[in-house]
Image: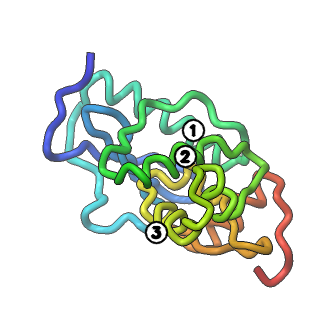
Amino acid sequence: MKTKNTTSPTRLPVATTAGDFIAEYTGQGLSGLSFPRQAGAKSKPTEIKTPPPEIRRWHALTTQAVKAALAGKVLPPLPPLDLARGTEFQQSVWRALQQIAAGRTQSYGEVAASLGRPKATRAVGTACGANPIPLLVPCHRVLAAGGGLGGFTAGLDWKRLLLEREGIELNKGR
C-alpha cells in the first residue's frame, strides 16, 4: 500500500560522520537527497513526530544506502525512487546512471551514446545536474571527456571523495 501523496514531502535527516543529509519522501518513494552543505531552508527536515510506517521503512533503507555509498561499498537495496519530477529524457539518464557499477565511470558522451543519443552530451550533463538523488543515483561516476571531473551538484570535493572511496584513481589536478 502506498503512502498518501501529499503536496508537502516528508524530509528527514540522515546522520553521517560527514554531516546530515536530508532525505525527501513523497507517497511514491525517495524523491530527493541533499548533501550536508546543500541543506538550505527548503531542505530542513519536516517537523513530524512519527512518519508513516512505509516512510520509516524507506528511511531505514535510505540511511543504510547513504552510509554504504559514503564508505565506497556496493549499495544495499534502495527504497522506491520517485523521479517523476524529471523530464522523460532526464529520467532515462537517471536510469542509465544506476547501471554504472561502483568503481566504474563513464563519460557524459558514453552515457549519451548508451541512450541512442550520441550528440546529447550536454543534455546528459544537464540531467546529471538536475538529479534529485545524486548520491544514490550515481552521477558522480560520470566524467568529462578525457577523464576530467566535469561537474557535480554537491561540488567537486564531494565528487573526488566519492570516486576515491570507490577505488577510482583520478589524475592529479582534476
The number of discs equals 3
Quadrant including the N terminus: top left
Q: Residue at x 41, y 37 (%)?
A: 81
Residue at label 3? 37
Q: Residue furthest bottom?
A: 173
Helix, strand or loop at label 1? It is helix
In the rendered image, residue 168, in percent from the top left (x then y), is placed at: 82, 58
Q: Which residue is mark 1?
A: 65
Three-letter residue code for mark 1: Ala
Report the amino acid beneath label 2: Leu
Let me know if residue 27 appears in the view: yes
Compute the Cα span from label 1 to label 3.
19 Å
Q: Of circles 2 and 3, which is in front? A: 2
Is residue 96 rendered to the left or right of residue 21? right
Q: Is residue 45 above or below residue 159?
A: above
Residue at the image position 17 percent from the left and 28 percent from the top: 4
Label 1 or label 2, whichever comes before in sequence order = 1
Q: Residue 136: give its label.
A: 2
